Image (cartoon, rainbow, N blue to C red):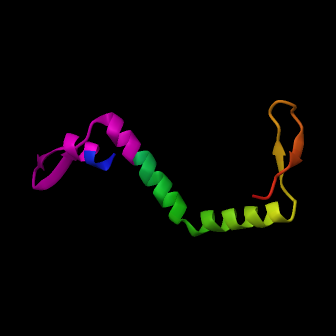
Amino acid sequence: MATSVLKKLEHGMIGKQPVVIVPLEQWRELEAKLEDYEMMRSVKYRKSIAEARRQVKQGKLARLNLRTGKFGKVADS
């Protein structure tokens, strides 16, 4: 993905500042990946995942079955 995006990049200057021009579709993909990357590096996010895993092991979480509309236990994986 990165190689194909890099091939489509154009660059130039605005005043003395270098700029990169990226097609909007590729920018949106890149932006989403950057947001995911920032989120995964978040200490709060990692703590919430660890807490959820503890709750699964303790049987405290429930999953909504969309077909039946009822809650059931989350299987420990």
Give the image quarter of residue 8. Answer: top left
Rendered-image quadrant of the C terminus:
bottom right
Where in the figure is residue 44, as x and y percent of width and height? 62, 66
Q: Residue furthest front?
A: 77
Q: State the residue in front, 70 or 31.
A: 70
> Residue 71: horizontal and vertical position, in percent?
88, 43
- The percent coordinates of residue 52 (x first, y second) are 74, 61
Pinpoint residue 46: horizontal percent, then vertical percent: 62, 66
| Residue stretch rendered in magenta on the structure | 4-30
All told, the count of numbered labels is 0
Nearer to us in this view, 22 or 67? 67
Residue drawn at point x = 82 percent, y = 52 percent: 74
Q: Is residue 65 left or right of residue 41?
A: right
The residue depicted at 23 percent of the width and 47 percent of the height is 6
- Residue at 27% from the left image edge and 43% from the top image edge: 4
Q: Judge from the rendering whether residue 51 lies leftward or rightward of residue 18; answer left or right.
A: right
72 above or below 40? above
Furthest toward the top, the residue is 67
Residue 41 falls inside the magenta stretch = no
Q: Nearer the viewer, residue 15 or 29?
A: 29
Q: Quadrant of the N terminus?
A: top left
Q: Report the residue at 11% width, 46% height from top.
A: 12
Seen in the image, is 64 located left or right of residue 46? right
